[in-house]
Amino acid sequence: MLFKDLNLIEPILRSLETEGYTTPTPIQEKAIPIALSGKDLLGAAQTGTGKTAAFAIPILQQLHKAKQVGKQYKSIKALILTPTRELAIQIDDSIAAYGRHLDIKHLVIYGGVAPNPQITALRTGIDILVATPGRLLDFMEQGFINLAFVKIFVLDEADRMLDMGFIYDVKAIVAKLPEHRQTLFFSATMPNEI
Ligand code: AMP
């Protein structure tokens, strides 16, 4: 199995080639067709297995295709929640790499830094938002972020979210998402609470 066998659009295949990826990892091979079809997904995968591309590539492809067919509004269309600033930055870098030939706007927000540059960037109209829970909730409460038009939601490292005490933040965020959406849920372990 090669990336070119996964029904990916040419601009994404070209960026994967630049990255030097030819063969999908097992989680990518399994998850990409399901995520591309719009179905929900529960993925058991650790960091280092290639799970970022497993959700980032289908998001980029779906948003690109939607852009070709209809008028686009300045709303957040995909939200990726992840527990740490380091992971959030890595995910945003991956989106930049795999989406380098696409006209999809993405942004990463996290706490511990000045909020103003993030608020200014949000105002330009973001398609894919990568966020840690605390800063996202803070911006939502201040009215800087509206999640009413999110079509794809990714919960990354769900077990670590639980360990780090983010469960109430995550629940408060999920409550503001549209009920009709695609959810991609990733966790390294699957304890009962997950
Ligand atoms: P992740 O598990 O998403 O953090 O990815 C782990 C590392 O594997 C990252 O450095 C990726 O750039 C790299 N990677 C992801 N998918 C592939 C692939 N199909 N072939 C080669 N390297 C990959």
Image (cartoon, rainbow, N blue to C red):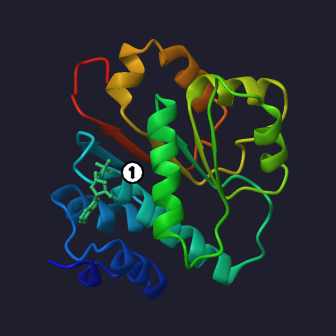
User: Which residue extends farthest top?
Assistant: 165
Q: Which of 115 and 74 lies nearest the eye of the viewer?
A: 115
User: Residue at image x 24%, y 83%?
Assistant: 5
Which residue occupies the foreground of this view, 128 or 101?
Answer: 101
Q: Position of residue 101 (x, y in %)?
A: 56, 79
State the image quarter where residue 94 is shown. Answer: bottom left
The residue at 27%/72% (across/down) is: 21
Relative to 187, is 144 on the left or the right?
right
Drawn side of residue 98 relative to residue 44, left or right:
right
Q: Amino acid at mark 1?
A: Asp
Vertical side of 157 occupied by 60: above or below: below
Question: Relative to 112, does residue 81 appear above or below in the rendering?
Answer: below
Tell me where residue 174 appears, x and y as whole percent. 57, 31
| Residue 182 visible within the image | no
User: Is the residue marked by circle 1 packed among few (<14), some (14-19), or many (20+) residues within 10 Å?
Assistant: some
- Horizontal side, residue 188 vs residue 85: left or right: left
The location of residue 32, given as percent across then percent down, is: 32, 64
Quadrant observed for ligand 1 in the rendered image = bottom left
Q: How many marks?
A: 1
Residue, disc 1: 40
Question: Which quarter of the image is occupied by the N terminus?
Answer: bottom left
Q: Could you tell me if residue 73 is visible in this image? A: yes
Helix, strand or loop at mark 1: loop
